[in-house]
Amino acid sequence: MKISARNIFHGTVTQLQPGAVNAEVGVSIGGGNQITAIVTIASAQSLGLAVGKAVIVIVKASSVLVLVDASGYRLSARNSLAGTITAVSEGPVGAAISIGLAGGNIVHATITHDSVAALGLKAGMPATAIIKASSVILGVAS
């Protein structure tokens, strides 16, 4: 599979909570990291989602927020992946930030130059990738 999304993780479904319209799906991506996705019941059924099933987690870099100091704040976003910035790549339009997670996965975010400056982002500093569960796409091998 080739896809333009920068964040592609292989994982295993650890939790499946169906609701009236949507299902909440917990996925372990290794290193103690968990990602929650919200998908429609129809999608969960067509993908054959079940606890223990191998899945692919896809998140566009533009859907990832970068947080450097959460002290005193609580967020409604379900996914909070703490790690260390491994790269800050400034481009002509914006910047690409890479956050290394325990277990070896890297989360990529694209943000503005102003945000890089305001947050003082540098390689080696701790940061957290924030991802809304509704921005997570799940896939399975056919």
Image (cartoon, rainbow, N blue to C red):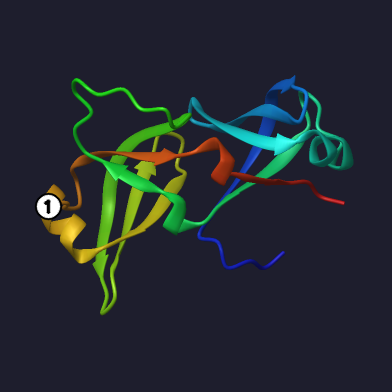
Residue 120 shows in the view: no
Q: How many marks?
A: 1
State the residue in front, 132 or 52: 132
Q: Residue at x 26, y 66 (%)?
A: 89
Residue 57, by quadrant, is top right
Q: Pinpoint residue 93: horizontal percent, then vertical percent.
A: 29, 76
Q: Pinpoint residue 69: horizontal percent, then vertical percent.
A: 19, 32
Q: Is 43 situated above or below 94?
A: above
Q: Pinpoint residue 33: horizontal percent, then vertical percent.
A: 49, 29
Residue 19, by quadrant, is top right
Q: Is 93 situated above or below 122?
A: below
Q: Is 19 situated above or below 87?
A: above
Q: Residue furthest bottom?
A: 92
Q: Residue at x 76, y 22 (%)?
A: 18
Residue 114 shows in the view: yes
Q: Is 73 situated above or below 44?
A: above
Q: Residue at x 19, y 46 (%)?
A: 124
Amino acid carrying mark 1 in the image? Ala
State the residue in front, 19 or 96: 19
In this rendering, position of residue 105 left or right of residue 56: left
* Circle 1 SS class: helix
Residue where numbered disc 1 is placed: 118
For the N terminus, which image quadrant?
bottom right
State the residue in front, 37 or 105: 37
In this rendering, position of residue 31 left or right of residue 110: right
In this rendering, position of residue 56 left or right of residue 83: right
